[in-house]
Image (cartoon, rainbow, N blue to C red):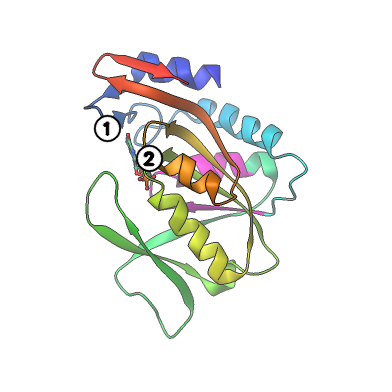
Amino acid sequence: MRELEERICRDGIVEDAEVLKVDSFLNHQMDVELFGAMGREWARLFAGEGVNKILTIEASGIGIACVAAQQFGVPVVFAKKSRTKNIAGEVYHTDVPSFTHGGSSTVIVSKRFLGPADRLLLIDDFLANGAALEGLIDLARQAGAAVAGAGVAVEKAFQPGGARIRAGGVRVEALARIKSMSPGRIEFC
Ligand code: 5GP
């Protein structure tokens, strides 16, 4: 999506060879107009897929997912970071290693909000090694929900997550795919 690529070139900061900072418009201060355009693009790409719920992960996926959900006319559920894995079997849980912070967190979704009737679009801001999306796919599998696909804002295509998730049979639509980057230079696929 040209608009997103242009914005990344203008306002994104390559911190090092691995991390792109986009906190002025994507995951701290949020440009909701831009999110609207992203949501419309995913709605066009996944039209006819029967998506009836969006599943995202705390925290930086939530804003993007909410704006996208308006285009689909469906609710959003976010996987919550939690200290307790299981409250008397009421939740699905999975462990997600963090790309940016190291370590891993347990995320949970209440069994009330995910089930076999759901056909999910997974949304997140970044796709790097794929752990966040794989966590969401695992929650969907536990719930017996179908995954129609995944929409990510930025895929760093030089990292292995996208290839692995596509190889697992999940359609991934990234609105900007970065082939390589270094401080002051970003090349898109
Ligand atoms: P993965 O789980 O695919 O390795 O990484 C995805 C998660 O890590 C995203 O939810 C995102 O929050 C974070 N992330 C990965 N790469 C970047 C990056 O280059 N910049 C920022 N700001 N976050 C990233």
> Is 47 placed above or below 94 here?
above
Q: Residue at x 58, y 70 (%)?
A: 143
Label 2 neighbourhood size at 10 Å, few (<14), some (14-19), many (20+)? many
Q: Residue at x 42, y 43 (%)?
A: 161
> Is 3 placed above or below 50 here?
above
Q: Amino acid at mark 2?
A: Ala
Does residue 57 show up magenta in the picture? yes
Expressed as whole percent of the image width and height from the top left, the position of residue 78 reads 48, 56
Q: Amino acid at mark 1?
A: Glu
Q: Could you say which disc has been placed on residue 136 in the image?
A: none
* Image side of residue 112 versus residue 109, left or right: right
Q: Which residue is mark 2?
A: 128
Expressed as whole percent of the image width and height from the top left, the position of residue 148 reads 65, 50
Q: Is mark 1 within 8 Å of ligand 1?
A: yes
Ligand 1 found in image quarter: top left
| Picture quadrant of residue 135 | bottom left
Q: Secondary structure at mark 2?
A: loop
Q: For the view shown, which residue lies furthest in the bottom direction?
A: 88
Q: For the view shown, which residue lies furthest in the front direction?
A: 167
Q: Residue at x 29, y 51 (%)?
A: 98
* Image side of residue 92 versus residue 95, left or right: right
Q: Is mark 2 within 8 Å of ligand 1?
A: yes
Q: 141 or 74, which is in the foreground?
A: 141
**Bounds of the magenta segment:** 53-69
Does residue 123 show up magenta in the picture? no
| Picture quadrant of residue 53 | bottom right
| Picture quadrant of residue 125 | top left
Q: Residue at x 54, y 47 (%)?
A: 167
Expressed as whole percent of the image width and height from the top left, the position of residue 50 reads 75, 50
Label 1 neighbourhood size at 10 Å, few (<14), some (14-19), many (20+)? some
Q: Confirm or deny contact between disc 2 and disc 1 (CB under 8 A).
A: yes
Q: Could you say which disc has been placed on residue 18 in the image?
A: 1
